Amino acid sequence: MKHKSLLLAAAASTALFSSTAIAQENLAEAPCEGCAEEMTLVSWGGAYQQSQLKAYVEPYVAATGVKVSFDESSAEATAKLRAMNEAGNVTWDVVDVVASDAIRLCDEGLAAELDPATDLAEAPDGTSAEDDFGNLRVNECFIPQIVYSTTIGYRTDMVGDNPPTEICDIFDTEAYPGKRALQKRPIDNLEWATYCNGTPKEEIYEVLSTDEGVQAAFDKLSTIKDDVVWWTAGAETPQLLADGEVVMGSTFNGRLFSAIVEQDQPIGMMWDMQSFDLDGWIIPAGLEESRMKRAKHFLKFATDTQRLADQAKYISYGPARKSSAPLVGKHEELGIDMAPHMPTDPANAGNVHNYDYTWWADNRDDLDAKFQAWLAQ
Amino acid sequence: MSSSETLSVEEQLAAGQSDDGIVRAADGTPLKARLAKALRREKLRSFLMISPLLLFIVFSFLLPIGDMLFRSVENQIVQNTLPTVVEELERWDPASGELPDEETFAALAKDLKVAVEERIHTRLGSRLNYEESGFSGLFRTTGRAVKKMESGPYKAQFIEADKDWGELRTWVILDSFKAPYTSGYFLSAVDAENTAEGVQMKPENERIYLQLFMRTLWMSLAITFMCLLLGYPVAYLLAQLPARTSNLLMILVLLPFWTSLLVRTSAWKVLLQGQGVINDILVWIGIVDDASRLVLINNQLGTIIAMTHILLPFMILPLYSVMKTISPSYVRAAKSMGANDWTAFWKVYFPQSVPGIGAGAILVFILAIGYYITPALVGGTSGIFISNRIAFHISTSLNWGLAAALGAILLVLVLLLFYIYDKIVGIDNVKLG
């Protein structure tokens, strides 16, 4: 079991804390009455969890002295939360999940509803949290942290002078022979296929709501079916690209960033029709009072404007608050400007695909069955 | 028959005549009764000794499995969330082609208000969404709207809130899933569904599970056969060599066994992929053209290769321990009577090693049928097993009812094969050493 326990002493990491000194009042120092002194956070592990650790978990521990265990089980969070809920013994306090999982958890009554007015911090200029997060709060349970995108990376040395510039190039096996890596799920793939069938962006979901539309999307995907390597873990595409197994492939933009910038691989990034998605926190339903208070106290601090901007120093995911964007600085170790690597940067966000969570919440079971059947044919 | 009764009869007999032919213990009680008593005590003692383990297995293994399997038919959520609606629907005939009456809609408003209060309406939505796309959203939007509904008539208000309430299909689904138990999950698990015209197969483009069950079975058989083919000579060699050499070889067999499953699987990825070690060597030698490298991974071949390697020790170890007990004098005797090497092996040695083959084959087959990590990593789309779908429904779609139904079918299949195996080979013919 991957289970990292960091029992950070309050005194030991005060040095870290000074680096994030800010003008805004420090919410971690706000009194927390009747709060539990221990807390279990759950996230995805890897570089992403590291960025959370540096940007707000360590500062929070330094300010409050709370004992924090940081679990790495987000990948199986929905199933585990349900099992814990049924057993009546929820051991997690704050859980990091993607937006679609948050919708499922909220629908199933496994995540607690939060009130943005009292549970979240205002922006420094006084904008309410509700407005600052805007429609990125996909439901009452979810507090978004980052905007990430699923986008395309390609081998610069395998495409010659003609690098792919638009999403439909993944369907062009003549210009770009070789395998392509796509995620083994209907989401994004069906939308891209529909878009490349000539459907305007705004009408994608309308078309996909019809049987003919779905069939047309599968037909489009069938044209490259023999050329696709299907991935399930975000690390697979960068590896396949690095090995020269595929000429291009979809993955999360942060994975491509580290392959290109940190590991210096011959990989290029194509942002066209990148699919925006969200990752954020939920608090499990049914926590006892003191733990709920602690979880909310932590979240208020961890999702304030400065903390979300801090996180971007460690990973190339865009902060979910509008007010955080101007505060995004340089990469902590490489010293490069992070803004141009954010999926939300205007230069990258020219043509984006806004993934419709609620539509997928309704249609996922059905389309997934069709997708799997299509794969098996 | 209670022993005390016997005893008293025999006591009477004993009082009557001393030479009755009954063997007695020192204190005069019949030896037979004493023996039975001692045996009973012995049995009780051994039962008490295994009882902690038994309790542990019952509570941590059998009960949870039973509970999980029960989910494949359990469907009380509709009745619990919408009790009045379910009652009202008793009066409604789905074949009538008309929507339920106003009273049913009023019941819906009443039940939903309670459900929204308890925040369980969306849970029902997710449940019904497994049967028909759109229920999830229907309950979410209606949940918001129902708070504002103060008085009737409700029918128009519901259709206003979401036009799906005006669709006959919505009510037919609700009606067909109102019972506390359902065969729906099992039907889905064999690519069928309940329609107005009875049970029918799903449309061609949604069928997947039967195909996966078949594939899981034949690939597991193929893997078992490959393990036997590769493992038998190795086990034979191990059994023939002197202890010093065979111990060294045994470590070579066990070493991969001690390595993490993920590491071994990932190693196969490096070896088998298009730009991988095996293809590179073949291209370098000139057997394979650079443009047409072999496709060894992300298909069934990849799964069979990687799983054969991973499960090989489970074949070799039982084979080895059985072969170790086969006395070399039998083969020597056969040869001394004129059998050639092959006949001596085939007629004398091989039949004695069959119990090891049986044990190894069962072990490998049963392990293979439930594997999902390796197929997921190297199987691509054509090399995945039914267990990959079970895992998906447990952890991603949260459709535990369907996962339980698939698991139950898999369990029954394994038991059935076990029974057939017992009939053909005989379970007595299995030996682990």
Image: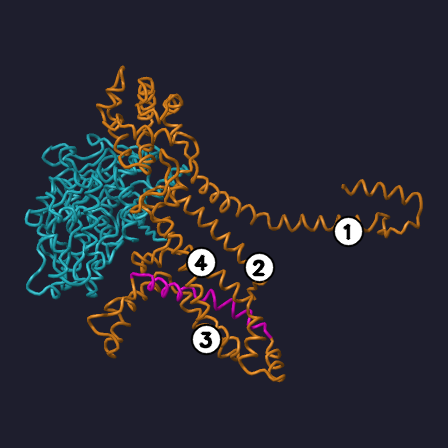
How far apart marks 4 and 2 lie (CA) works out to: 18 Å
Cα–Cα span, label 3 and label 2 = 30 Å
Disc 2 target residue:
B427
Q: Could you tell me residue A216's position as x and y percent?
A: 19, 46
Residue denoted by label 1: B35
Give me the chain that's orange: B
Q: Of callouts 3 and 4, which one flags the residue occurring earlier in the amino acid sequence?
A: 3
Q: Residue at x 37, y 63 (%)?
A: B304
Q: Is residue A208 left or right of residue B182?
A: left
Q: Secondary structure beneath disc 2?
A: helix
When the figure is inspected, residue A251 is found, relative to residue B236, above or below; the finding is above
- Reading the image, the residue beneath label 4 is B367
Above/below status of B15 relative to B353: above
The colour with which the image depicts chain A is cyan
What is the magenta range? B298-326
The answer to whether residue A126 is magenta is no
Label number found at residue B249: 3
